[in-house]
Amino acid sequence: MKHTLSVLVQDEAGVLSRIAGLFARRGFNIESLAVGPAEQLGISRITMIIPGDNRTIEQLTKQLYKLINILKVQDITHIPCVERELMLIKVRAMSNNRSMILEIADIFRAKVVDIAHNYLILEVTGDPGKMVAFEQLLNEYGIVEIARTGKISLIRSSNVNTELLRKTFNQNIISN
């Protein structure tokens, strides 16, 4: 299972290197990593996607707390969160298929950020499932390049689990 860890760290040189070293020494892969300033000056938030079972993640959390500059570690996998990724995607856009690509972009609320004679670069944000669906649809037109951020995530103050609501909604549609 994949776990989402949210880690608050003091924003100092070498923190990310020490975290990556900890994971490498233990043979764990970081599938996704996003780092940026947090709400307080001098503090950064690291969001990591780590494969592993609950016991493994618990041990990694304990090991992270032993590192200097680690302020807080949370496994937010099963907590209602807002999750987003950003993807830039360059796709072949010939005159005969450009309108279809733009229609797909519109449906996914993607923005055109660069246009050339035979190419478009599109920017799309959303949950990881949206990124995969968008990429799959554009695949038939010829994807040239993709740059994708890691997932970022914040715990919902409302405690509303939109993933659970989405599943319930979809089950209701199927059963009707």
Image (cartoon, rainbow, N blue to C red):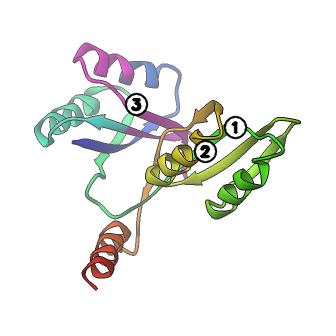
Tell me the CA gap for discs 2 and 1: 7 Å
Query: For mark 1, what is the residue?
Result: 91
Q: Which residue appears at 37% of the width and 40% of the height? A: 71
N-term mark: 2 or 1: 1
What amino acid does circle 3 point to? Asn
Q: Residues within 10 Å of mark 3 (few under 14, many from 20)?
A: some
N-term mark: 2 or 3: 3
Residue 85: percent from the left, percent from the top? 53, 47
Report if the CB atoms under discs 3 and 1 are less than 8 Å apart: no
What amino acid does circle 2 point to? Leu
Query: For mark 2, what is the residue?
Result: 138
N-term mark: 3 or 1: 3
Residue furthest to the top: 25
Query: For mark 3, what is the residue?
Result: 69
Query: At numbered mark 1, what does the secondary structure look like: helix, strand or loop?
Result: strand
Front position in the image: 43 or 26 = 26
Residue 90: percent from the left, percent from the top? 70, 36
- Left or right: 172 with respect to 97? left
Residue 86 versus residue 107 in the image, above or below = above
Q: Which residues are magenta?
A: 20-48
Q: Which residue appears at 38% of the width and 21% of the height? A: 20
As for residue 34 lying within the magenta part, the answer is yes
